[in-house]
Amino acid sequence: MRRLLIATKNAHKTAEIRAMLGADWEVSDLTSHPEVPAPEETGTTFAENARIKAEAASRVFSGFVLSDDSGLEVDALGGDPGVQSALYAGTHGDNAGNRAKLMRELRTCGAPQPWRARFRCAMAVAENGRTVAEFDGRVEGQVIAEERGAGGFGYDALFVPDGYEGTFGELSAEVKNKLSHRARAMEQAGRFLKK
Ligand code: ITT
């Protein structure tokens, strides 16, 4: 079986990517590799942060490293929370706080619903400290005013993808993993990794 390190500490991302890749890969992430650094995400774009994370990990891990930098862009907020999605409310990974802040911002921004938005995901594959491939995925939809559904993570309970009635928090993991920003980047990454 081939080894792939996902340069993330976010177990939700790892679980989704593992399900998308299937049984051919032995997938691990930074939670089981304390020797691998998680660098500061100093980039101003998803792609830049994806490269930073993949390259840092692949300097110490032999084999392919895949990173995922992702987030939600809301048009009424000029693209926020964007690359700041994980620490929008001030504490990294405070999902409930981030959703609450998003609701506050949207209720006070003056823009009428529907609030158009998209999830974006940039992925980088690195080997020996160098990025060797990059991929991009997005899914368009709208943010709603009340949370619905307990599945997924992050902003899932507030996002309804185009063509569906349910939020990512209400849709099954199987459905989310077919149409999400991560799935769309991963379709391309999977083809690259299989070569
Ligand atoms: P790593 O940097 O360790 O990979 P992270 O969670 O900090 O983990 P990011 O910096 O890429 O990752 O921030 C991603 C944030 O965007 C995440 O914390 C969520 O708030 C949001 N997000 C990304 N993908 C999402 C998804 O599929 N569903 C809901 N929210 C998502």
Image (spheres, rainbow, N blue to C red):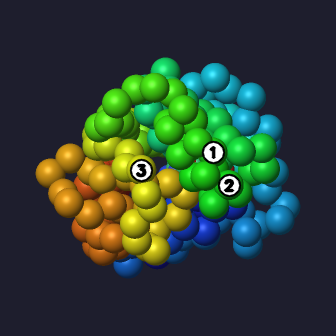
Q: Quadrant of residue 82?
A: top right
| Mark 3 neighbour density, 10 Å: few (under 14) some (14–19) many (20 or more) | some
Q: Residue at x 67, y 26 (%)?
A: 43
Disc 1 element? helix
Q: Is mark 2 within 8 Å of ligand 1?
A: no
> In the rendering, which numbered label is found on residue 97?
2
**Total count of labels:** 3
Q: Residue at 43%, 57% (x, y): give it.
A: 146
Residue at 36%, 62% in the rendered image: 168
Disc 3 + disc 1, Cβ < 8 Å = no
Res 151 quadrant in image: bottom left
Which comes sooner in the sequence, label 3 or label 2?
Answer: 2
Q: Nearer the viewer, residue 45 or 1?
A: 45
- Whether label 3 touches label 2, CB < 8 Å: no
Q: Amino acid at mark 1?
A: Lys
Residue 55: where, in percent of width, then height? 67, 39
Residue on which disc 1 sits? 101
Task: Measure the C-alpha gap from mark 3 to mark 2.
Answer: 15 Å
Seen in the image, is 143 located left or right of residue 171?
right
Q: Is residue 97 above or below residue 33?
A: above
Is there any visible trace of residue 59 in the rendered image? no
* Drawn side of residue 174 relative to residue 111, left or right: left
Mark 2 vs 1: CB contact within 8 A: yes
User: Percent from the top left, x then y, of residue 185?
Assistant: 36, 45
Can residue 106 be seen at all in this image of the molecule? yes
Q: Secondary structure at mark 3?
A: loop
Give the residue number, with chain letter if any, for mark 3: 145
Q: Residue at x 54, y 32 (%)?
A: 108
- Crowd class of label 2 (few under 14; some 14 to 19; many from 20; radius 10 Å): some
* Residue type, mark 2 in image: Gly
Q: Secondary structure at mark 2?
A: helix
